[in-house]
Amino acid sequence: MAEAPQVFEVAGGDFGGKLMVTRRTGRAVREALGDALEALPKGGVLYVDTRGVELMDYSFADEALGVLVSRVAGGEYGEKYLILVEEDRDLLENVEASLRQRSLAMMRVDEVGGEPEIVGNIPEHLSDTLRTIMDAGSITNADLAKKLGLNHTAMNNRATRLVKLGLIHRKIETAAPGGRQYTYERIA
Amino acid sequence: MSGVLTMGSLDPAFGAAMDVDGEPVTLDLRSVEFVEPAGICGLAALLEFLIPRSEEVSVRLAGRDVPAYLERMDFFRLFGDRVRTNVDVHALEERQRHNPGTLQELVNFHTEEEIPGVVTRISEILENKGYRLRERVAICSTLSEICANAAEHGSTDGGFGAFAAVQAYNHIVSGARRRGEEVLVAIADGGVGVRETLSKNEKYAEHTTTDNDAIRCAMMMGVSGTGELGRGGGLALVAQISGRASGSLSLRSGSGRVTAYHDRKNSRTVPDFPGTFVRVSLPRKLENAAPEISLG
């Protein structure tokens, strides 16, 4: 049986209820999210549910999510992933602004199990790669390269960038003697 | 002094205050008929500057409405025993204190920690007044961002920190008086000002030649004194929020003052004065409002 997804309800904690303002509050939420990420097994996904929050100002969004996404992308938490659970509403504007300023992005779903969208900024050429991986669910580097008309090295470089941003998962398998085959998988 | 006490009307007093050196000072506000949040915050910052530099500071007011409004905005609670006034404050205190349009009386704060409490209170009042979630978010985000800036840059050792005030009006008060509703948010801090803050970041050396250049630069996304990634977004978003509402963001610091509208920015040189002053106008778009009919 699959493990229940780990969901962190931001409005449910003792941080600020429905009104999330200031970097100070953002830091407190980020530290709690960091602890939750640390507790996850390798490859685990933490769903950050902000649907109960009415107001999230830019300072809070940058400190709680912008900084955290930056640290996840920097490999600080190892192979673990963050997904925002939020509807398409005004509140996303500040998350989007923070991630764009940091040239970062994260996955967003309307609800756990929902179809993912991107919040933030990824270059156009990476968007195509991400979309193809998302559509496939799981795809080898060779098949991905074929679909997008790129050589294997260029394809691997693009997909690796998406892995580093924490937007997809990479599985390394042993292929021919001494060879390795990369498979890219969606995280949500 | 003009009939409206706002950010700009205190400019002559700011200019004169810089020359005060121990002598008694009288602020003659008898011609003032209407006080908006930027005026009361500016007055508070001016008094904080004058009180330690003057033997005695007097504030002269006329009529009943302005003293009563200042009392309701907690002005005399903060300054009553520090300045001399021709107003009988005790008589005013007996009147009902609450003003239906007041979202935040004049409040003095020093740290970021105090901001969520202020924002929560205003959000509750706005909700009770029937403001939609989107409107509350715009007003509260604006307030929290500029308060956070003031708490971060305004707290110098022994300084007064910052003052904030917020008022809702059932007509438009910015520019020509017309139909509609408007919320005015104002903050004044006693910090080092925008130019000195930005000067810490060499990247903006070319943009800190004048106070007006520095203010214009500070309104852009991602511009901050620390240069830290992710910083410097709050003010730019406040300008976007006010612009979208057809309002404005005015910032006064040093000898510069810039007002940003949705499609342009106006700058003017003003008398040099320490600190930073922010005024945000957020007109309210009324749903189901009857169209105005001109009979002219």
Image (tube, coloured by chain):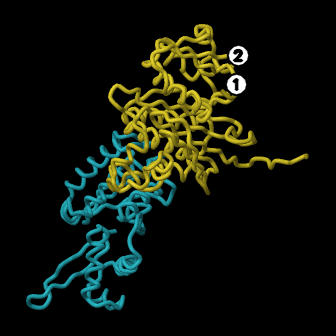
Chain colours: A cyan, B yellow
Q: Residue at x 35, y 64 (%)?
A: A104
Q: Residue at x 68, y 29 (%)?
A: B2
To which residue does mark 1 refer? B33
Q: Spatial distance from mark 2 to mark 1, Cα to Cα?
A: 8 Å
Mark 2: give few (<14), some (14-19) or many (20+) Cα within 10 Å.
Answer: few
x and y percent of residue A43 in the render? 22, 66
Q: Look at the numbered disc 2 and give the secondary structure of its residue.
A: loop
- Whether residue B8 sits left or right of residue A173 in the image: it is right
Residue A78, image quadrant: bottom left
Q: Is residue A66 something that shows in the picture?
A: no
Which label belongs to residue B178? none
Give the total number of marks visible in the rendering: 2
Is the residue under label 1 in contact with that under label 2 (CB below 8 Å)?
yes
Mark 1: give few (<14), some (14-19) or many (20+) Cα within 10 Å.
Answer: some
Q: Which of marks 1 and 2 precedes in the sequence?
A: 1
Comparing A65 with B205, the one in front is B205
Q: Amino acid type of disc 2?
A: Gly
x and y percent of residue A17 in the render? 41, 41
Q: Which residue is drawn at 49% across and 27% down?
A: B18
Which label belongs to residue B63? 2
- Establish if B254 lies above or below A79: above
Residue A161, image quadrant: bottom left
Q: Amino acid type of disc 1?
A: Glu
x and y percent of residue A56 in the render? 44, 48
Q: Look at the numbered disc 1 and give the secondary structure of its residue.
A: loop
- Establish if A99 lies above or below B28: below
Whether labels 2 and 1 share one chain? yes
Residue B269, image quadrant: top right
